[in-house]
Image (cartoon, grey):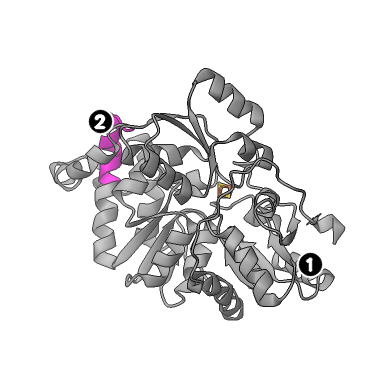
């Protein structure tokens, strides 16, 4: 039994690399061959074949985030992208079942947008340090402290937080959403929750005053300026792309900063000779597959939550219909309004963050200060 199959006890027939499996999966191997030795492929292919068969049988789709491993991203994912792209796909799909190959707040978002569909997360432990940093009760206290100030929250939040939100944003549209919220609510200040670094990076790009929360992504906050300097020394001429969940001094050292889709588009459009992505590890693998002439330097931090999702767990989710996402109706209605406002806005530009001097935000709140 291959190690990868240990999690699917009692399903040995599905796991064999048979002629039938080979016929069903050979055409997919080219997409991941650079990262997957043939021997390993033989352990993965039976899961890929079984998942793709079950998707057809059950009218299911898999939404794969950019941080999924290449075999999930390329071989079983029906739609791939960043949080915003996946949220839009979730809203439009005709499938009866959505399997979220990502973390739980993304599955929550899919369920909020598609209340009549069955939404599954293959592992309930696929959480997020950022989403866990704040609760709906925290947001209610902030609203009491700052009456009349619109609440913009990053989509990387749980449903109870979205239900207390006026409008959601992603890292790709954050600046424009903050400016929209201030104008629409007639204020010069916006509560921007919960990522303190994204808040600072947004504050550097707008005149709107921003009050934020002491949350952080444990993957991106670990990158430092020294990491980038060492990379440049070891790889002269390398182009450095960074995600705006990184601290502002890290972004200031980068050549370009943008969301996962922003970074992916940068590589596609500019085809740099050598590039490094200051973000989660699988991102480089997936973008490299789409840009074979670009050399990727690969220091990265793994997201332990994203990496809880693997092929055996996706197969098990489709077989057992676990773990189904449920959200209380009243909470879902309020959260849907916040997400839908973002989706419905005719946004005209991507947020760009490559600045040199990030100002301090007006205030950074924490539970202790409320
Ligand atoms: S990469 Fe960061 S923001 Fe994304 S799921 Fe992991 S901890 Fe959360």
Seen in the picture, residue 178 relative to 1 is either above or below; the reply is below
Seen in the picture, residue 23 relative to 225 is either above or below; the reply is below
Is label 1 in contact with label 2 (beta carbons under 8 Å)? no
Most prominent secondary structure in the magenta stretch?
Answer: helix
Q: Name the residue under label 2.
A: 38
Question: Where in the figure is residue 284, as x and y percent of width and height?
Answer: 43, 37
Judge the density around disc 2: few (<14), some (14-19), many (≥20) Cα neighbours within 10 Å: few
Secondary structure at numbered mark 2: helix
Secondary structure at numbered mark 1: helix
Which range is magenta? 35-47
Task: Confirm or reject: label 2 Cβ below 8 Å from ligand 1.
Answer: no
Q: Nearer the viewer, residue 133 or 57?
A: 133
Question: Is residue 43 found left or right of 336 in the rendered image?
Answer: left
Label for residue 142? 1
Dividing the image into 4 quarters, which one contains the C terminus?
bottom right
Seen in the picture, residue 40 relative to 130 is either above or below; the reply is above
Residue under the image location 30 percent in, 40 percent down: 44
The CA distance from mark 1 to mark 2 is: 54 Å
Q: In which quarter of the image is residue 248?
A: top right
Q: Nearer the viewer, residue 70 or 235?
A: 235
Dividing the image into 4 quarters, which one contains the N terminus?
top left
Residue under the image location 65 percent in, 76 percent down: 184
User: Residue 7, can we see it?
Assistant: yes
């Amino acid at each position: 039994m291959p190690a990868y199959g240990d999690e699917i006890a009692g399903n040995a027939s599905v796991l064999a690399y048979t002629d039938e499996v080979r016929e069903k999966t050979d055409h997919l191997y080219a997409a991941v061959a650079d990262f997957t030795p043939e021997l390993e492929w033989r352990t993965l292919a039976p899961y890929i074949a079984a998942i793709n068969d079950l998707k057809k049988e059950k009218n299911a789709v898999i939404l794969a985030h950019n941080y999924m491993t290449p075999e999930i991203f390329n071989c079983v994912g029906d739609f791939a992208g960043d949080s915003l792209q996946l949220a839009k796909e979730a809203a439009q799909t005709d499938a009866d079942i959505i399997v979220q190959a990502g973390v739980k707040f993304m599955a929550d978002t899919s369920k909020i947008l598609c209340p009549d569909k069955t939404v599954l997360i293959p592992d309930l432990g696929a959480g997020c340090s950022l989403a866990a940093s704040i609760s709906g009760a925290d947001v209610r206290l902030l609203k009491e402290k700052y009456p009349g100030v619109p609440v913009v929250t990053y989509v990387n939040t749980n449903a109870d937080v979205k239900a207390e939100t006026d409008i959601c944003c992603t890292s790709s549209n954050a600046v424009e959403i903050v400016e929209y919220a201030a104008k629409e609510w007639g204020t010069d200040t916006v509560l921007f929750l919960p990522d303190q670094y994204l808040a600072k990076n947004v504050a550097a790009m707008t005149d709107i005053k921003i009050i934020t929360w002491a949350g952080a992504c444990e993957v991106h906050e670990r990158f430092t300026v020294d990491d980038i300097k060492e990379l440049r020394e070891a790889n002269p001429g390398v182009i450095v792309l960074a995600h705006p969940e990184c601290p502002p001094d890290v972004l200031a050292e980068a050549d370009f900063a943008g969301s996962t889709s922003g970074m992916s588009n940068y590589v596609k459009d500019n085809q740099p000779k050598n590039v490094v992505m200051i973000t989660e590890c699988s991102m480089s693998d997936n973008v490299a597959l789409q840009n074979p002439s670009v050399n990727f330097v690969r220091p990265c931090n793994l997201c332990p939550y994203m990496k809880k999702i693997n092929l055996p767990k996706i197969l098990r989710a489709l077989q057992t219909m676990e773990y189904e996402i449920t959200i209380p109706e009243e909470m879902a209605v309020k959260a849907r309004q916040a997400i839908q406002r973002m989706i419905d806005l005719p946004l005209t530009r991507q947020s760009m963050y490559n600045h040199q001097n990030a100002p301090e935000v007006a205030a950074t709140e924490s539970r202790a200060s409320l």
